[in-house]
Amino acid sequence: VTGVQTCALPILIERLDGTIDIGRLMGDVRAGRTPKGALRRAVADAGALVGSLHGAGFLHADLQPANLLVARAGARGATALDLDRSRFTSQGPLPADLAAANIARLWRHVRRREQRYGAVLTSGDRALFLASYGAARGDIDGLAARIDRGADRAGLAHRLGWWLESRVGRGEDARAR
């Protein structure tokens, strides 16, 4: 681990060999470079990680596929990246409304990639994510609907932002293809 001092705030940089972000993994599955089973394992590991973060009262400010690293080659585990602006909101679990909104943020990014490049995740994959997150079997459909509503509500503002970004900001994310 290397520490870099910027604006009096330490930034830690570490290379995590043997990992891939979920956004790139989705692109690799879509392109046929990686089997679908690897994505299913990653979805389960990401669900468990997000569930652990939310269980600790942690709100990830930029929860999206590119900020979730998973192990390659059959290993298990996930790591969250880009934690600036993220915070602990409580001493116990994250309140349910914040947790659902945070997962809705992730879902918006997944939807965007799938609309642009083609779907690779199924409703079963989403149920696997939520089960690994810690949702009880009988609660998965209700939680999924709540997350969808949250993603839909904020979707218009995000689509506008993404459109502006495509015109004046970053170009297309080649990793997602």
Image: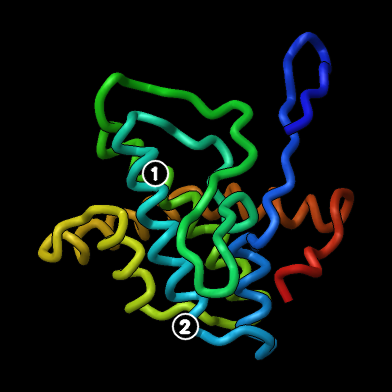
Q: Quadrant of residue 13?
A: top right
Q: Nearer the viewer, mark 1 or mark 2?
A: 2
Picture coordinates of residue 89, whole percent (x, y): 38, 22
Picture coordinates of residue 96, whole percent (x, y): 25, 39
Q: Residue furthest top?
A: 8
> Which residue position holds label 1?
101
Disc 1 versus disc 2: distance between alpha carbons?
28 Å
| Residue at image point 10% right, 64% down | 138
Which mark, by number, is residue 65? none
Q: Residue furthest right?
A: 168
The amino acid at mark 1 is Ala
| Residue at image point 33% right, 78% down | 124
Could you say whether the residue bearing mark 1 is in a helix, strand or loop?
A: helix
Q: Is residue 4 left or right of residue 12?
A: right
> Which residue position holds label 2?
37
Q: Quadrant of the C terminus?
A: bottom right
Q: Nearer the viewer, residue 16 or 6?
A: 16
